[in-house]
Image (cartoon, rainbow, N blue to C red):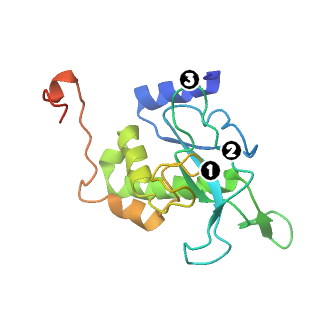
Amino acid sequence: MLQYKDRFFDFHSRYYTDSYVASAGNSGDDVGSPGTAWNCITVGSFDDFDTTSWTGDAMSGFSAWRNPNTGCEKPNLAAVGGVVDTLGMAPDFLRNNYSGTSFAAPFVTAALAVTMTRDASARYSPEAAMAAIMATAWHNIEGATRLSSRDGAGGLNQRAASNSGGANKIRYVYLSRSSFNNSGYY
């Protein structure tokens, strides 16, 4: 069931054309709010085990993946969120081995920002921005199908996402029933 936060983000996305990225949650079960909002790009976590190869990457056991009962598939995609190094405020500054979907979501936010700077149409259409990020997440981490329950569309491919923008490659149109022919094609 949609929570107040979910409705808030859906409203703002639709009426103010804002894009939002949310963490799926670390329960290992149900995706939490506001990640259940239809218009939030919800991010799960995988571990790349500090290798540059996609072989051996695995979904993090803590990454929430069960779809909410809103009819919307979540998470939308996954990003590295297992064993992440980050800067801290302590004297040694580098903090090691953090894990969580909150560490995966910033990677998607960065890829989205780069895509938006390369193609302005992604800034004004949250649906097009979400589609670009999901369409370029072709790193299938788990499951035999393209869209799986744990990693959504797949693992984030930042290079492909940033290359999807530029030279007005992202196009959005308003569709209505009359946009389609009798066979259902656009």
What number is the disc on residue 44?
1
In which quadrant of the rendered image does the N terminus lie? Answer: top right
Residue 61 x, y percent position in the rendering: 73, 54
Q: Give the amino acid at mark 1.
A: Gly
The residue furthest front is 144
Foreground residue, 144 or 19? 144
Nearest the camera: 33 or 168? 33
Which amino acid type is shown beneath numbered disc 2?
Answer: Ala
Residue 5 in the image: state x and y as whole percent. 62, 26
Q: Secondary structure at mark 2?
A: loop
Mark 1: which secondary structure?
strand
* Residue 171 shown left or right of residue 72 in the figure: left
Instruction: Name the residue: 46% across, 57% down.
Output: 137
Residue at image coords 55%, 31%? 37
The residue indicated by pointer 3 is 7
Image-quadrant location for residue 14 = top left
Q: Disc 3 versus disc 2: distance between alpha carbons?
A: 20 Å
Q: Residues within 10 Å of mark 3 (few under 14, many from 20)?
A: some
- Classify 36 as above or below 171: above
Left or right of residue 39, residue 2 in this image: right
Task: Point out which mark residue 64 bears.
Answer: 2
Kindly report which numbered mark, 1 or 3, lies closer to the viewer in this rendering: 1
Q: Residue at the location (45% across, 37% down)?
A: 18
Give amino acid for label 3: Arg
Foreground disc of the pair 3, 2? 2
Q: Which of these two is toward me, 79 or 68? A: 68
Instruction: For the residues labelled 2 and 1, say whether their Cβ atoms are less than 8 Å apart.
Output: yes
* 145 to the left or right of 101: left
Sequence-first tag of 3 and 2: 3
